[in-house]
Image (cartoon, rainbow, N blue to C red):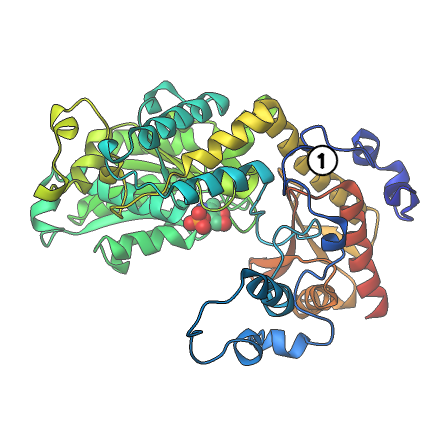
Amino acid sequence: MTCPVREAPTGCATSPAISRSRCCERRPHEPAGVPGARVPDDRLDRRLLGEPGEPSRRRSGGAGFRARAAPQDPPESGEPFERLLQDMEDVVAPALLHWQHPRFFGYFPANASGPAVLGDLLASGLGVQGMNWNTSPACTEVEQQMLEWTRRALGLPERFRDGGVIQDTASSAVLVAVLAALQRATEGRSRETGTGGRRYAVYLTSETHSAATKAAVIAGLGLGSVRTVATGSDGSMLPEELRARIEADRGDGVTPLMVVATRGTTSALAFDPLEEVGAVCRSHGVWLHVDAAYAGVAAVCEELRWVNDGVGYADSYCTNPHKWLLTNFDCDLFWVADREALTGALSVLPEYLRNSASDSGRVTDFRHWQIPLGRRFRALKLWSVLRWYGVAGLRDHVRVGVEHARLFADLVRADDRFELTRDPCLGLVCFRLTADGGTSEAQHRLMETVNAEGTTFLTHSEADGRVFLRFATGGTFTRDHHVVEAWKALQGAVTEG
Ligand SMILES: Cc1ncc(COP(=O)(O)O)c(C=O)c1O
């Protein structure tokens, strides 16, 4: 088999990323014996989005499943499972965006892997509810151990020991963090009176994920509680601005409640300076929540531990193995330094859940650490991933994603019709087309053309009113040649356009 990387015309032969890479080799972490761990080749040829000739329908948001395949009423009698599988093939798959496709470079990755699927299958089949320790002790204890394993693997501080839990998403993590902050700030009075007519403030930046604003609204603080702190040119929070906003609020009788700092923002990976922000929070007694949903797991590699610099100041912290750590959605790791604030905010005890183990005070009931009562055995998929790949395999996966971003950035640099809008960071390359007028419309046109071809998928964002394109590596099945093929698709779209 020829190597598509070495055949690639532009820049590749001299790319340092290419010479570093293991092109055409099986990646060391790639499992051989787990069903579903590798996508069969015919699936890889599949289009990423929809079927050829249907872009207009896709753009209008109607993929056609309901019109083409779904009868108005459910079947009266049962059907063989094969028929459902056939429909999956014929009408569901063409209406999917294939996030596990090796040329999916949109948003951030949402890694699935064979071991995670098997772990999840076990959890689904067992169907246990881990709301209380006594409803399945192993469900709680495996989870506790997984949080300890990952705390160590990511080099997170001792203050988070025994303070970890799996949430579904980073959005839930920031919500429970707001509630815990409210509990601490009011010494528990918020349980009785809610905000009690007091005004609170939550500080973030324009780059913070919208989940934080949503959390403030859900917690009853109102949109008026949200303060958007100014950022520097790199999009990171300016600590002196934060201090000034907090002091101004204090002067106005508003209680500064919480700062949401991000390590690796969604749009272009800005990193809020935790040490300075943390010092401001400490001096004003403000809860610091750190959202490292995408970037945090990169700390599995020693050389990338900087992603969590300053995390020792955090009252709560979260990162998502379901993005870049080979663990199927959903799986968010959430730690708090003070468990009492969290469980104080979220504990309610109806008689029907009372049991002697909980009464003994010697066990952990994770229902007090989250919004819902019921909880899946999510730790099984994480356990499966950690045991199958080992920490070394996870490091390798992250490093390959970083290499792929460097490779793509080298290709962009070598073509004067494009420019990087910043140096590649972790697995994200932000770039733009300078040809075709270099306008925001030109970026959209290029992205839509490439995505409509169905062989590559990428997304966009905006900074200072200018649209740029995002190329996010780190897919479970992505190899060097997929990166090069995606680049060729972009070049081809410019040439044709
Ligand atoms: C920095 C950051 N925070 C939060 C989120 C939301 O993640 P989730 O879907 O787990 O709520 C994202 C999603 O991309 C993100 O990038």
The residue at 68%/33% (across/down) is: 30
Q: Give me the residue at 91% from left, 42% from top.
A: 1
Instruction: Please identify the quadrant where the C terminus is shown.
Output: bottom right
Looking at the picture, does residue 496 appear above or below residue 418? below
Q: Does residue 284 appear anywhere in the picture?
A: yes
Q: Position of residue 225 (x, y in %)?
A: 26, 54
Q: Nearer the viewer, residue 276 or 68?
A: 68
Count of numbered marks: 1
| Amino acid on which disc 1 is placed | Glu
Depth check, front residue: 132 or 54: 132
Q: Residue at coordinates 75% horizontally, 41% vertically from top-left?
A: 479
Q: Is residue 73 above or below residue 214?
A: below
Q: Position of residue 240 (x, y in %)?
A: 38, 38
Pick out the residue farthest to the top: 158
Q: Quadrant of residue 291?
A: top left
Residue behind mark 1: 403
Q: Nearer the viewer, residue 215 or 63?
A: 63
Dot 1: few (<14), some (14–19), or many (≥20) neighbours within 10 Å?
Answer: many
Q: Quadrant of residue 180?
A: top left
Where is 401 relative to 469, above or below? above
Q: Nearer the viewer, residue 278 or 360?
A: 360
Q: Quadrant of residue 55?
A: bottom right
Q: Position of residue 213 (x, y in %)?
A: 34, 54
> Image check: 18 left or right of 353?
right
Q: Position of residue 441 (x, y in %)?
A: 66, 70
Please indicate, yes or no, whether residue 208 appears anywhere in the rendered image.
Answer: no
Kindly state the secondary structure of the residue where label 1 is placed: helix
Mark 1 residue's CB less than 8 Å from ligand 1 = no
For residue 94, side relative to residue 201 (left or right): right
Q: Residue at x 59, y 40 (%)?
A: 113
